[in-house]
Image (tube, rainbow, N blue to C red):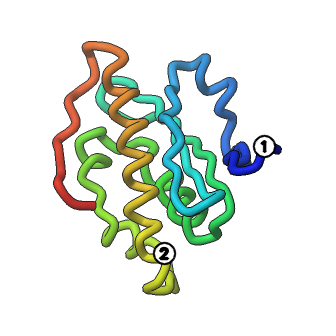
Amino acid sequence: MTPGAIPEPLPVGDLASAAAARIRASTPLLLAPGEAVRFAVSVEHDHITDVAFNAHRCVTLFACCEAIARWAPGRPVTEAARLTAADLLGLLAGVPPSKADRAAAALRAFRAALAAGVAEAPDRCAIPTRSSG
């Protein structure tokens, strides 16, 4: 690996085949050195049908991403877009305060992928904006 390069995150879910089913991956969100997260979201008729993610090096970040990936399928896009970091931390037990910022990072990556999925076709709904995570 090239010095300073971000290693490819380990995949969770099948991003390669999911892309063929109109799931669009967001640009990786780079956090601390070596930490990165990326989501892919499929949206049909204003509802999330599938979520996959890549997360690397941080167990708390991975747990936050997994919680989103389990929670979101079947929900309306507007409901998923309103998920907050506090809501996400409420789905998880025992996240240390020093790692609570990982919930906001996971949500930023999820929202980017959600916006990309919604933008793919006119039958998808708009995502409400929210100033804080």
Of residue 51 and residue 28, the one placed in the foreground of this image is 28
Note whether residue 50 is visible. no
Q: Can the viewer see residue 84 in this picture? A: yes
Rate crowding at label 1 as few (under 14), some (14 to 19) or many (20 or more) other CA atoms within 10 Å.
Answer: few
Q: Label 1 amino acid?
A: Thr
Question: Residue 2 bears which disc, if any?
Answer: 1
Name the element at disc 2. loop
**Mark 2 → mark 1, Cα distance in angstroms:** 35 Å
At 69% from the left and 35% from the top, the residue drawn is 14
Query: What is the quadrant of the N terminus in the image?
Result: top right
Q: Which mark is residue 111?
A: none
Amino acid carrying label 2: it is Leu
x, y (%) of residue 27?
50, 35
Q: Which residue sits at x=67%, y=47%?
A: 6
Of residues 55 and 120, the one drawn nearer to the viewer in this rendering? 55
Report which residue position mark 2 lands on: 92
N-terminal-most mark, 2 or 1: 1
